[in-house]
Every structure is written in C-alpha cells, then in structure tokens.
Image: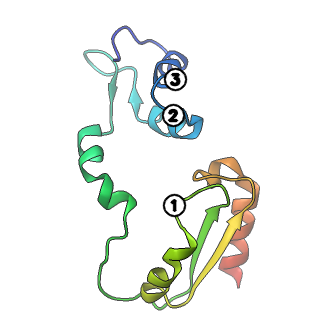
Amino acid sequence: DLTGLATRGEADRRLAVTVEDPGLRAFFLQSLDLKADGGPRWRLNFDVLEAEMPKIVGWPGTPGQFDGPTLFLTGAESHYVRPEYREAIRAQFPKSRFAKLIGAGHWLHAEKQREFEEAVRVFLIA
C-alpha cells in the first residue's frame, strides 16, 4: 500500500513487513516513483512478474549453443545457480566457467563490488 508514502525510508519499512531480504527490498525500491502524477507508484509490473516467475527463475530450455567463453559468477550464499545445473549450462555454454564470491548472495555485484569487478576483469583479460 503506497497511500501517504513520502520517502524511500518509509517505503522500505513498509516493504520489510513482507520482504525480509534487504537486497531484494533495495532492488524493488529502485523502481518506486515517489513523484508520479497521482501519487507514488511502482514502475515494475508485479502482476506480470508473479505470473512469469517460473520462467524467470527456471531454465528456459532454448535450443542452440553459445560457443564463446562464458562466466557464471555467483555469490556463495545464493541458491540460484546450483551445482546440479552445470550439466544443462554446459550443454548450452560449452566453454562456461564457474566462480563464486565468498560472503555474497544473489546481489553479488552490490554486496562485493570490488571482488565482483576483479573476477569479471580477470575473466575478460583471460
């Protein structure tokens, strides 16, 4: 409920009631337009996100391969790219490499910025 909302801090407090993860709340709050005509509104279409979530978090099963080098960089605390998925990943990305950032979750680029940049830099110059 965005009624009477004036600040992102207040939006974060309200969102915290249903979304425990601060990183996920920060992601959602990026799409909050506090100055929209008619009052605050979300730029994200939550109805579509909810309806399409199985496609978003699942493996799309698209045909074909990408034969170039590919880095799958994940946070060690994230559960989105699991070891049991590697066979399917390698089927589409034969030259894939896997790396994890210790102490990072799903939002590794925000949680471990320097480590993220270094891992990507090393991959790109290899």
Q: Which of marks 2 and 3 is nearer the N terminus?
A: 3
SS of the residue under disc 1? loop
Q: Where is residue 115 in the image (x, y as percent from the top left)?
A: 75, 60
Say which quadrant the C terminus sits in: bottom right
Q: Distance between the residues labelled 2 and 1?
A: 18 Å
Name which residue type carries label 2: Arg
Which residue is painted at 29% across and 44% down in the image? 50
* Mark pair 2, 3: CA separation: 7 Å
Does the image show residue 29?
A: yes
Residue 83 % position (x, y): 57, 74
Marks 1 and 3 sit apart, C-alpha to C-alpha, by 24 Å
Depth check, mark 1 against mark 3: the one in front is 1
Give the labeled residue for mark 3.
12
Residue placed furthest toward the front? 84
In this orientation, which residue lies closer to the viewer: 47 or 88? Answer: 88
**Marks 2 and 3 close (CB-CB < 8 Å):** yes
Q: Which amino acid does label 1 sit on?
A: Tyr
Q: Residue 45: in sight, yes or no?
A: no
Q: In which quarter of the image is residue 73?
A: bottom right
Residue 44 vs 70, above or below: the answer is: above
Q: What residue type is disc 3 on?
A: Asp
